[in-house]
Image (spheres, rainbow, N blue to C red):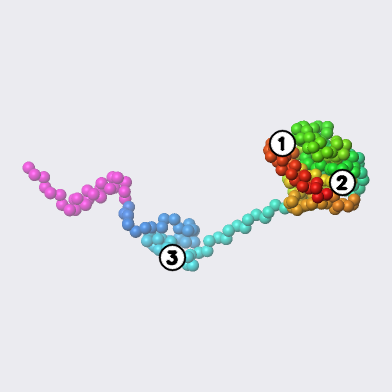
Amino acid sequence: MNSPQPTLAREFASALAWWQAAGVDCDFHDDATAWLADEPLTPAHTAPEGAAAPTRRQHAASAQAPQAERPASPARMAPPPAPSLPARRNLLGDSPPADCAAFRAWWLEAPELTSAAAFPRIAPRGEAGARLMVLVPQPEEGDRTALLEGAQGRLLAAMLAAMGYEADAVYCAAALPCHTPMADLASLAAQGMDAVTAHHIGLAQPQRLLVLGGNLAPILGAQEPDGLREINHAGGKLPVIFGDTLEAMLHMPRLKARFWRRWMEWSATL
């Protein structure tokens, strides 16, 4: 016995029942729809009570409207102001040290100088009027009683001997009173350490100045080391030469050769 052929209505009902059992209860279109509007709907944009809700096509038409017709987006917040640098201070006070001995005592005890708590302050060494003054950024990490007691000091002693300087003919000083990891010398100079260094050089009155560290340029009142050839102070004009830090020369021997060539050229002009 043959089963009766299903009618079109029965086939349609069966198809709908299958899709409903699969969880699909909405219709779909091939047209693209903007699901993400530029701005979410606010209560002011919702339809009044009793009015028909906007259709999906109306939402798409609104999203595709010209830019000029859309509501202006909120203004962006202005970036926060740049942090201001610490104010410049008169670190030397109204009665600055009058000679090298007084400066050493002030260097070790003055509360105005910022110090790293983990490291002791180290005084400069040498006598005023030396043939050469050597300025380094800071004491070595292991310095406890004298400036440059470690590997950097041994390298400097070898360099000075090759240059023809005896130990008592050199005045050694640091721009900072104690070892200070990651010190911002430009910021410290702007806070008044440049004036301290200038006063220190004026008291020492050397005949020449060797600066080991390009980052010391701001401490000496210059932007770049190559732009500074001499310093004016009460005793006259002081010739200046820059070199790499002792720490850098210890790790990169080629810097020693570069400094020696620069030193020979500079010495020949004096």
Question: Foreground: 10 or 49?
Answer: 10
Residue position marked by numbered label 3 in the rendering: 65
Magenta span of residues: 1-25
Give the residue drawn at x 74%, y 44%.
Answer: 261
- Return the disc, 2 or 1, that comes first in the chain's sequence: 2
Question: Foreground: 13 or 126?
Answer: 126
Residue at the bottom extreme, as displayed: 68
**For mark 3, does the 10 Å Cα neighbourhood hold few (<14), some (14 to 19), or many (20 or more) residues?**
few
- Mark 1–mark 3 Cα distance, whole angstroms, equals 69 Å
Q: CB atoms at circles 2 and 1 under 8 Å apart?
A: no
- Return the disc, 2 or 3, that comes first in the chain's sequence: 3
- Return the disc, 1 or 3, that comes first in the chain's sequence: 3
Q: Amino acid at mark 2?
A: Gln
Give the residue drawn at x 25%, y 46%.
Answer: 18
The reply, left or right, for residue 33 in relation to residue 207 is left
Tell me the SS state at disc 1: helix
- Quarter holding residue 135: top right
Residue position marked by numbered label 1 in the rendering: 250
Whether residue 210 is visible: yes
Question: Foreground: 185 or 88?
Answer: 185
Where residue 268 sits: x, y (%)?
A: 80, 48
Residue position marked by numbered label 2 in the rendering: 207
Please say whether residue 7 is one of the residues in the magenta stretch: yes
Q: Amino acid at mark 1?
A: Leu
Where residue 127 sits: x, y (%)?
A: 89, 40
Quadrant where the N terminus lies? top left
Tell me the SS state at disc 3: loop
Q: Amino acid at mark 3?
A: Ala
